[in-house]
Each structure stands twice: as C-alpha cells, then as structure tokens.
Image (spheres, helix red, strand yellow):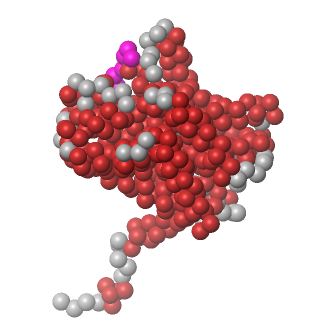
C-alpha cells in the first residue's frame, strides 16, 4: 500500500502530552520540597500509633488531611506567585503590626515544634541504624543537615535534588515494607473511605491532621515557588496551574507513603495486639515479624525522612523570621538556634515518641493561625489582582478552617476532661 506525503508529514499524537510534560517539568520541585514535611518523623509517630492502636480505622483521616493540605498549599503557592512575596512578607505588608507580631510568635512556636520532631526522627534513625547513643546521633544529625544546607552554594536545584533523593528512599522503603505485610486490602478500603472516630482516637486523629497539614509548610511554599514566577501576570496564570500540578503530584505521593506507614503498623502491630508507644519498639517488633532486612529498611527510611524534613524545617524557619520581621538571618544561625531545644529534649532523656506525637497535636492547634490569614489574603483582589480566589475556593477554604477549629476545640475539651493521652 502506497504511503502519501500527507501521512509522512502528519504529527504523532503522543507528541502533545510529551510537549505538555516538557513544559511542566521546569516547575517541578517546590512542592516536593514541601512534601517532605508530610512524611516527616512526626507523621511516623502518629501513623504508627494510629495503625497499631486502631488498625485501618484512621486511614480516612489521612485522605481527608491530604485533600485539605492540597487546597491550602495551593493557596500558599498562588499567593507567592501572584504577589512576588512570601506569605510572611505579605502578612507584614498588609496586616496591622500587632497582629503581624502575634502571627510571628505562633509561627515560630510551630517551627520549633516542627524542628524538634524532625531532628528527633533523624537522631533516632542514626541510633537504630548504627547503634549509636542518642546524643552522638543528635550531633551527627546536626552535621548532616549542615552538609545538605551547604548544597546551596551550587544553587537551589541542588538542594531540591538532594531532598527528592531522600524522599525516594522513604517511598521505596515503604513499598518494600507493604509488600512484606500483605495487608487486608478490603479493610484498607473500608478505613480509607468510611469515616469512623471515637474515644481516644480523636487525639491521634488530631495528631495525624497536625502532622499532615503543617503550618510551617504554608509559610515555606509561598517562598520556594518565587524562583518560578514570571514578571508578566498573564504568564503567571500558567505558572499557577503548573504549580498546582506539582503540588497535586507531590502531596499524593506523600499521602501514599503515610498510608503505607499506617498500613504496615496495622498489619504488623494491630494484627498481633501490640500497641506501639515508641519508634524503637516499632523497629524491634518489626524484626522478628518481618525479618532483619525490614528493620534495617525501617531505620534507613526514618533517617532519610528526618534529614530531609529537618532541612526544610530550617528553610521554613528562615522564611518565617525574615518575612515577618524583615531581617536577614543566616541559615547556619537558624539551624543552630533550632537545634538547641531538640538536643535539650534528648539530653533530658524525655520519651522521644511521646514528644513527637505531642508536637504534632500542638501543630494542629496552631493551624488556624496559619490558615485564617491565608484564606483572607488570597480572597482579596487588592492583594491577588487577577489571581484572586474564585468564590467557591474561598468558601471551601472557610469550611476547612471552621472544621479544623471545631476539631481543635473538641481536642482541648477532651484533654481537659482527661480523655486524651500524649
């Protein structure tokens, strides 16, 4: 059969998706940097406790928290792209000075709680992987994070690549762990799509929410997207869409990792009637059930998670203090300041697991202070210009904020009545 000239010159259909993908790739990175905070050691603590104590029952909380995070992180990135400033900078420029100072205090508190959790996780990773004592492991963690931050001399992309590599380590490790567990997939589906909660599960559910939707990530995302921003606001329409796709991909990967952690905990610990109250206990219990390799992979993933998230927590802390107070602050100095509380916790011999869970509940209580100004600012045309929220977006964000406020109130009442436990 003869081939016509028209057939020879006709474009191939697959070229269109490839072209779109090639156009989107330069915008990939910021959300994956942010996603580290969604699979940090604080998440491990709440996921392990939730899975070991309640089986698959709280998987729906992870799904709901991921959807909330997707909306809020998108608003944060959009704010940065539309204004050319980070979220803390916009607060300083647009809000009354006393309110700005108050927001800075709550943001700093969140950053400290976050960094303690991240740092403890990496320290536990070194401790479990190499058998080192906690204090030497803490010092080794500090050095490792300084090394990662030192990659800045090669440009921001070098830091992004290092973080993406560590995220890949965590994800691969949990694909391996889930393969060993052979979960009850019907139970997984039921726990993911049928909401159930009651009694002490509220405390863990709030911990999961605080660990997933982290305040410092809302401040950081608006800053790390700035190097993708264009001068032309019409071009920024595409940048915002590309940023959303970046966020969608990164946060859904983080959700799958979180779900995998909880599923492994449910399959290994809940299935054997073992409630986990420490990461060390989780590591020790995994080995006789799944084998020594599973324990090593667990420790390696914890170390990768802690190092990556501790690095991004330092970046978030710098964004917060420079944005709210308009001062220059070296990353090294920021790292030194936030290391101190974590080392004090370790030196005092406090239970690292309980500190991790409690820190995530504290973050959840701080969330409204990060959410309310973000929703207000992104709904103001004077701030956002042509990128102002659609009415339905603002309505949805208000509903999300109201639900979080209500859950926080319930948690405080429960803890006041002695129903919660840290």
* Quarter of the image where one finds residue 276: top left
Q: In the rendered image of this protein, does residue 97 appear above or below residue 409?
A: below
Q: In the rendered image of this protein, does residue 363 appear above or below residue 232?
A: above
The answer to if 83 sits in the magenta stretch is no
Q: Residue at left 48%, top 60%?
A: 162
Q: Foreground: 240 or 197? A: 197
Relative to 193, is 110 on the left or the right?
right
Place of residue 208 in the rendered image (x, y in percent of width and height, measured from the top left): 43, 31
Q: In the rendered image of this protein, does residue 344 appear above or below residue 90?
A: above
Q: Residue at left 42%, top 20%?
A: 202
Q: In the rendered image of this protein, does residue 217 appear above or below residue 376?
A: below
Q: Residue at left 57%, top 55%?
A: 146
Place of residue 404 in the rendered image (x, y in percent of width and height, measured from the top left): 53, 26
Relative to 132, is 235 on the left or the right?
right
Q: Identify the residue at the far right of this view.
A: 97
Place of residue 308 in the rendered image (x, y in percent of width and height, measured from the top left): 49, 51
| Residue 209 appears anywhere in the view | no
For the C terminus, the quadrant is top left
For the N terminus, the quadrant is bottom left
Write the start and end of the magenta stretch as one range. Answer: 192-200
């Amino acid at each position: 059969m003869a081939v016509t000239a028209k057939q020879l010159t006709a474009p191939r259909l697959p070229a269109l998706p490839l072209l779109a993908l090639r156009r989107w790739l330069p915008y990939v990175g910021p959300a994956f940097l942010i996603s580290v905070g969604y699979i940090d050691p604080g998440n491990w603590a709440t996921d392990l406790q939730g899975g070991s104590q309640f089986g698959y029952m709280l998987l729906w909380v992870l799904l709901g928290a991921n959807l909330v995070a997707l909306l809020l992180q998108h608003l944060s990135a959009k704010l940065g792209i539309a204004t050319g400033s980070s979220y803390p900078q916009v607060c300083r420029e647009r809000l009354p000075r006393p309110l700005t100072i108050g927001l800075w205090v709550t943001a700093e508190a969140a950053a400290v709680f976050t960094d303690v959790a991240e740092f403890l996780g990496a320290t536990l990773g070194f401790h479990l992987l190499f058998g080192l004592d906690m204090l030497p492991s803490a010092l080794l963690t500090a050095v490792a994070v300084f090394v990662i931050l030192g990659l800045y001399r090669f440009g921001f992309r070098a830091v992004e690549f290092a973080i993406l590599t560590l995220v890949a380590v965590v994800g691969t490790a949990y694909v391996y762990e889930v393969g060993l567990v052979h979960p009850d997939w019907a139970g997984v589906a039921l726990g993911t799509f049928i909401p159930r909660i009651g009694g002490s599960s509220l405390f863990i559910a709030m911990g999961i929410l605080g660990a997933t939707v982290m305040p410092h990530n809302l401040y950081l995302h608006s800053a790390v997207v700035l190097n993708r921003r264009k001068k032309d606001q019409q071009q920024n329409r595409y940048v915002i869409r590309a940023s959303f796709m970046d966020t969608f991909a990164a946060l859904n990967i983080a959700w799958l990792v979180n779900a995998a952690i909880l599923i492994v905990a449910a399959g290994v610990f809940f299935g054997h009637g073992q409630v986990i109250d420490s990461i060390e206990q989780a590591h020790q219990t995994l080995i006789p059930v799944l084998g020594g390799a599973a324990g090593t992979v667990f420790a390696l993933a914890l170390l990768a998670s802690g190092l990556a998230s501790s690095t991004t927590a330092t970046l978030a802390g710098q964004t917060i203090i420079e944005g709210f107070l308009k001062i220059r602050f070296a990353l090294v100095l920021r790292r030194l300041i936030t290391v101190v509380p974590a080392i004090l916790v370790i030196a005092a011999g406090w239970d690292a697991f309980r500190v991790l869970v409690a820190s995530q509940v504290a973050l959840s209580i701080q969330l409204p202070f990060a959410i309310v100004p973000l929703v207000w600012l992104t709904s103001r045309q004077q701030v956002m210009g042509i990128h102002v929220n659609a009415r339905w977006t603002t309505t949805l964000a208000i509903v999300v904020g109201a639900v979080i406020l209500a859950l926080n109130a319930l948690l405080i009442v429960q803890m006041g009545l002695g129903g919660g436990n840290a």
